[in-house]
Amino acid sequence: MRKASEFFSVALFCLPLTIGVAGAANQPQQMVLPNGLKVIVKEDHRAPVVVSQVWYKAGSEDEHNGTTGVAHVLEHMMFQGTKKVPSGEFSKQIAAAGGRENAFTNRDHTAYFQTLERSKLELAFKLEADRMHNLVLSKSTYDKEIEVVRNERRWRTDDQPHGQVYEQFMATAFDANPYRWPVIGWMNDLINMKVEDARAWYNTWYAPNNAVLVVAGDVQPAAVFKLAKKYFGPIKPKVLPVRKPQEEPVQEGIKRVAVKAPAKLPYLLMGWKVPVIRDAAKDSDPYALEMLSGVLSANAAARLPTALVRESQVAVDADSGYDDIQRGPGLFMIDATPSEGKSVAQLEGDIRAQIEKLKRDGITEEELNRVKAQVIAAQVYQRDSVFYQAMQIGEMESAGLGYGAIDTRIEKLKAVTVDQVRDAAKKYLIDDTLTVATLDPQPLEGKKPVAPPKGLHDAF
């Protein structure tokens, strides 16, 4: 099951360390510094490794028309040096210490992380605290880096037909919410963006009281808290902008968009507006939707690959995706590629037929139990990785749910019933909340493979 962002993203995270599950059961400990920085520590003593992550609660959802993509641009600039650490030196120091580092921008947040031998944690703190409030944003460096970002957009979206479809799909599905624009930004905004825009973003959102510091690995919480106070404690908090509600107008009727791009086969992307988790303990529909997505495509025996790929052979692939953890509005998505000689109209009709069958007949306990085992195992397996333990915490904190929602979510998934799954399909997979995007393939003559741009270091 793919999250919505995975329809166009490329994961470039550090390879997680996976060693047995023993020792991953320690509960996180936290403290909040006087300047508002929340520090969360998850002990895992199975290997002498530590992961340090700084999550800023600001992503493309917080941007405005005219400067879309600025959150991602600033992420690039965060590697371009401070008064104390020249451009490129951050990465060099981490590498010299035997570590790895990277960053990513999302709709809801921007995160920076390092994986190091445990004794090198102080280096990560020293460097991250420095660039939290001492970043140098020069025009000359910006002019070089913005071209890297523009090329990245060309590579990720402009030269990728499925990327173009996803971008137009999001722009059609949402009318008011900033989720409608791409994380990387519209090209026109990137062309007209100035270093002053990146500086304004940095001065507005990059503050200890808008960040979460997550540390996981072979560490003692008391020692981590002491280091955090030493390096992050002196940074002054900022008065943060008040986020106003950006609710979507009620959709009444199907929305459709078609995209023409060079490609071999057509492509279909369908998405319904659905809720996401707002209260991990009280909500129920998001967990049923998660299981519904699993029933449709979590494994080879799931309904979409069985009915559409193997039996009718109307599709070469069919998948569903739903992300229940995010600040903004949710989408339940199905994407599929028709087999050669088959049309997207026929494929859409067959997908609709499968959904209606599920609404009418429901699902079996066997189906649900198989999906539960897979979904819950995937959640638990993440705890076998020091890196993804920290990721789970950061994601929950950035979404405003708190890291305690990690365990709550698993228990709620276990409790989902077959009736809840069918009821969720009936309630949410309806035409009045549906957006459909299709790819109209154009000739491939003269189309050359596109290589990723030099300087690409992040993932969405």
Image (cartoon, rainbow, N blue to C red):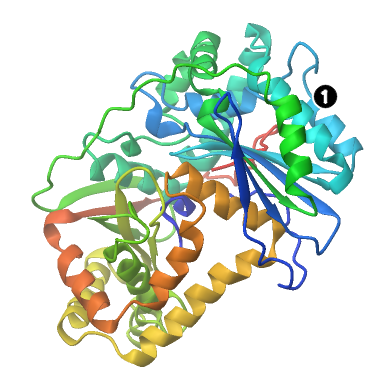
Where does residue 308 sit, x and y in percent of width and height?
A: 34, 79
Where does residue 330 sit, x and y in percent of width and height?
A: 31, 51
Q: Residues within 10 Å of mark 1 (few under 14, many from 20)?
A: some
Residue lying at the far left in this picture: please name it. Answer: 252
Above or below, 157 relative to 62: below
Secondary structure under tag 1 reads helix
Can residue 18 be spotted in the picture? yes
Where does residue 206 sit, x and y in percent of width and height?
A: 55, 23
Above or below, 122 relative to 294: above
Q: Quadrant of residue 380?
A: bottom right
Can residue 445 be spotted in the picture? no
Q: Quadrant of residue 365?
A: bottom left
Instruction: Report the side of 47 relative to 201 (left or right).
Output: right
- Name which residue lies at 28% across and 86% down: 363
In the picture of the structure, the residue carrying the numbered disc 1 is 89
Instruction: Report the side of 245 relative to 379 (left or right).
Output: left
Where does residue 191 sit, x and y in percent of width and height?
A: 47, 18
- Name which residue lies at 52% across and 8% down: 196
Total number of numbered discs in the rendering: 1
- Name which residue lies at 37% across and 18% down: 66
- Name which residue lies at 43% across and 39% down: 107
Above or below, 167 relative to 440: above
Q: Nearer the viewer, residue 332 or 35?
A: 35
Quadrant of the snapshot with the N terminus: bottom left
Above or below, 426 relative to 82: below
Residue type indicated by callout 1: Glu
